[in-house]
Image: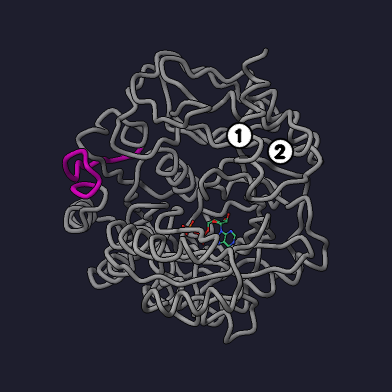
Amino acid sequence: MVFRKVLIANRGEIAVRIIAACRDLGIRTVAVYSEADREAMHVLLADEAICVGPPPATESYLNIPNIISAAEITGAEAIHPGYGFLSENADFAEICESCHIRFIGPPATAIRKMGDKAQARQLALEVGVPVIPGSEGTVEDEEQARKLARKLGYPVLLKAAAGGGGKGMRIVRGERELETAFRTAQAEAARAFGRPDLYMEKYLIEPRHIEVQVLADAYGNAVYLFERECSIQRRHQKVIEEAPSPVLTPKLRQELGEAALRLVRAVGYVNAGTLEFLVDRDGHFYFIEANTRIQVEHPVTEMITGIDIVRQQIRIAAGEALPWTQADLQIRGHAIECRVCAEDPWTFMPSAGTVTRYIAPQTFGVRIDTALYSPYRVPPYYDSLLAKVIAWGEDRAEAIARMARALTLLRVEGIRTNIPLHLQILEDEAFHQGRFSTQYLESVLPHLQTVASSK
Ligand code: ADP
């Protein structure tokens, strides 16, 4: 049987999403919250709620002793970490298990093997999954970096081995830039992740970011739930995601899926996970990194497969076997997600304050994952994601049209949001035709802003 009670070590829309999955399974929920989140939606909706500390995440949502105590006091049998915070912390996964609390995620060993990006790269090579030409493991010093960059040819990319969220990444366009780039990337990596280790890759020109969602159970069964196209990015951060990718052929889709499953098997992966790839203009794909947790953009996959990924995560953690094989899975229609954030649409400056009015029509084919209500004071301590708007259609054009309609009906007043940017992208011709790369958004941004301001 699945668990009776689950603690959710997160906040915002993902905490609400996990509460919903627990309800479906008849599981009671425990919310944890910081002092800044007393009035947060996840606190209001969970069956029980416990305060775990002051507003800064390091003292609350990242406070392992307090979160474990909250689980023990409430008798929660398992912890769902959501994304961000403790979700990819192998030590936390291990501590949970040693306290006889099930961690709803992969085993600590798998998190460790995938968590070091330089090591994950080596592993991919060993199981015959292509990676971008670059260093074997980490780059020790500037001298080694210079030699390798000459061999690879500029531009190259320096990346933090412990990286995430686009931090500690530096494009180096020529040898003159190498020394400074190496030092700043090292310093940034040390500051953000506590480790200065860097590795190097050839910098691909205009690739697409395509990732594969996988599910694996504890009995050696694993399937891929196809791909998500996440090329609409700003500063290496995703803005719009969709599934399926407008450019994959069935053959390439299968090759990517099978490559993802080779990596899953190589590390003894269990639970939901994502393998990220870059795909070049000629259809060659290269593994870049693994995310050992639920992802922000998981709803687009749920919409095209009909599979509740969060519910599956809980079932897998409770020891259930996957109920299907690869042959049972199919793609139906097309789904798009827009991340609505509390920020200026053109300068991207964060916008804190109170949402004075929130209207979200939930109409046919549209799903909104959010923890917003009004009035609601957006706390300045956490990330700026306010809502995820997900639209489904029989085909891509219908999904885009429904998304545009949904965004024009959505009202978030009192703070600035990036809804105007989304609307402009949805109208853009290149976006409509599916002709874009990870460089698309930054290159069309000035044009989109001009069009928006002339309206
Ligand atoms: P993070 O973990 O910090 O998010 P990733 O390795 O997942 O870093 O890369 C994030 C994004 O950075 C990718 O989606 C892509 O846009 C860009 N990127 C990463 N590696 C390369 C590369 N070798 N060439 C070109 N772009 C890259």
Q: Is residue 52 magenta?
A: yes
Q: Quadrant of residue 337?
A: top right
Within-10-Å neighbours for mark 2: few <14, some 14–19, many 20+:
many
Q: Residue at x 36, y 31 (%)?
A: 41
The x and y percentages for residue 195 are 30, 68
- In the rendered image, which residue does mark 2 sit on? 392
- In the rendered image, which residue does mark 1 sit on? 367
Q: Is residue 34 magenta?
A: no
Residue 220 shows in the view = no
Within-10-Å neighbours for mark 1: few <14, some 14–19, many 20+:
many
Q: Residue at x 33, y 52 (%)?
A: 85
Q: Is residue 258 above or below residue 294?
A: below
Q: Which residue lies most toward the bottom here?
A: 126
The answer as to whether callout 2 falls within 8 Å of ligand 1 is no
Ligand 1 quadrant in view: bottom right
Q: Nearer the viewer, residue 340 or 21?
A: 340
Quadrant housing the C terminus: top right
Secondary structure under badge 2?
A: strand
Answer yes or no: do the residues labelled 2 and 1 have beta carbons within 8 Å? Answer: yes
Q: Earlier in the sequence, mark 2 or mark 1?
A: 1
What span is in magenta? 46-60
Report, in whole angstroms, how far the alpha carbon at label 2 lies from the one at label 1: 8 Å
Q: Residue at x 51, y 81 (%)?
A: 122
Q: Amino acid at mark 1?
A: Arg
Q: Amino acid at mark 2?
A: Trp
368 on left or right of 137: right
